[in-house]
Amino acid sequence: MQLPIILATLTCVLGISLGQLLFKKAALSMPASPGWYDWAFNGWLLVALVLYAVTTVGWVWVLRNAPLSLAYPFMGLAFIIVPLLARWWLGEAVTVQTLAGGALILAGVALAARSA
């Protein structure tokens, strides 16, 4: 893949990863029994939905320019990025198993990218 496509792909992965954290923040900000108002005016949720919409448009652009078999393995990076961002932003624990799994995913992404 060419550098601009790789950068766009990584931007999409980062957007999806950040969106997951925003969804978590939206969930944490909901009352125990949310009503329609709580859903419709949840700022975290609205920002997450906009980010997902923009990221989806970016992902469609990526797929117009790269084979899915090459682009999609990069989405596996979200399995590393999300726990690390959750640790940094939400204070969640990151286990050795998560890091080991992330290392395997990185190896798989590197292998798939090299086949390009």
Image (tube, grey):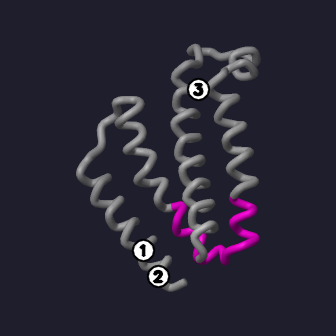
Whether pointer 1 and pointer 2 mark residues with C-beta atoms closer than 8 Å, the reply is: yes
Report the residue marked by disc 1. 110
| Magenta range | 59-75
Residue 91 position in % (x across, y down) = 34, 30
Q: Is residue 98 above or below residue 4?
A: above
Name the main secondary structure of what is drawn in magenta. Answer: helix
Residue type, label 3:
Ala
Query: Image check: 12 left or right of 39?
Result: left
Q: CA distance from mark 3 to mark 1?
A: 33 Å
Question: Residue at image x 75%, y 61%?
Answer: 60
Q: Quadrant of the N terminus?
A: bottom right
Disc 2 marks which residue? Answer: 114
In front of the other: label 3 or label 2? Answer: 2
Query: Which residue lies under the disc numbered 3?
Result: 26
Left-right relation of 79 to 97: right
Secondary structure of the residue carrying tag 3 is helix
Residue type indicated by callout 2? Arg
